[in-house]
Amino acid sequence: MASRSKLDKELLKGTGISFKQIFSGKWRRYFSWQNFIDPFFVVLGFFQSLGILIRFRPHVIFSKGGYVSLPVVMAAFLLRQKIILHESDSRMGMANRIASKLASTVCVAFPNLLKKGNKYRMTGNPIRPEIATGSANKGYKITGFKKGLPVLLVWGGSQGAAEINEMIADDFANFTHAFQIIHITGKGKSIEKKSANYVHFSYLNEELKHIYAITDLVIGRAGANSLYELAYLQKPNIIIPLSNTDQLSNARYFEERGAGIVYKDTDRLFDLAYDLWQNNALQEEMKKSLNQISGGGANQEIVKIILDL
């Protein structure tokens, strides 16, 4: 099941996966009038989920968490169905904290969330295997770039990040002199800069695997799924986590293990990227650390847990 957002629908389009969209609500940790309205959407989503589960009669519910999953998990618990929960981040969100009480098994990607007993399982984050099947030739064709100058991928998550976009714009001449830049800006957040060594996209989905194939360095946010993709692909990276979010603890986990460099307000982003590119030894050490974090077996481990229930 998915939320009624256009992004969820866009992500699932063309995958061949049948899905149902339900109403959902989220609790914001700041004042918003939507906090008074969204509980009604949760209740509505619960009854929608209940009807869908009664008709579909699944053997197991697998939830990746997030506010849209809570009504589904609550409905599944009422129907006494087996629930497997997966937490991607190093800090469990509110929806998953509630859902974890109802789940049969809780899979985690970061060891700090492990608890005593058999309920919690360390699996890592599942990765789309196809991200490693990209074609460099197609990547160069998509971007119009040429071999020679290093390729820097910059992104701020699925919605983009104005903060990161501004840092690229402010040092645009230096960035485009040292790198060929692929910039995923987010919808409506492009910067008014042009160069033969710069190309921007609002969003990438199917083409991303080809972009990865030509990427040498990455600058991006600290969403757990994105970080684990970089770990799987062993891409040296600079992490700019959103403040006061679970991204901070995700970023610290990677930095403490030598698997990424966390940007600080006193840093100059271009200097970090250029120095990392010039330091081959550091890149190789980072790749080794990324490989150790990835493990590569999360998909199989989660499938085994599902089949064993």
Image: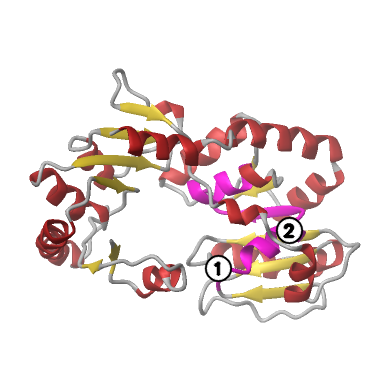
Q: Amino acid at mark 1?
A: Asn
Q: Quadrant of residue 203?
A: bottom right
- Work out which quarter of the rendered image holds the C terminus and state it: top left
Tell me the number on the disc at residue 205.
Answer: 1
Badge 1, how many Cα within 10 Å: few under 14, some, many 20+?
few
Which residue is rendered at x = 75% and y = 74% of the image?
A: 143
Badge 2, how many Cα within 10 Å: few under 14, some, many 20+?
some
CA distance separating discs 2 and 1? 14 Å
Which residue is rendered at x = 13% and y = 61% of the image?
A: 55
Measured as percent of width and height from the top left, residue 190 is found at: 60, 77
> Looking at the image, is 102 positioned above or below residue 45?
above
- Describe the element under mark 2 as helix, strand or loop: helix
- Work out which quarter of the rendered image holds the N terminus and state it: bottom left
The answer to whether residue 237 of the structure is visible from this angle is: yes
Measured as percent of width and height from the top left, residue 93 is found at: 31, 44
Q: Quadrant of residue 67?
A: bottom left
Q: Amino acid at mark 2?
A: Ala
Measured as percent of width and height from the top left, residue 24 is found at: 21, 63
> Looking at the image, is 125 positioned above or below residue 41?
above
- Describe the element under mark 1 as helix, strand or loop: loop
Q: Which residues are magenta?
A: 203-231
Does 129 appear in magenta? no
Task: Give the residue at mark 2.
Answer: 213
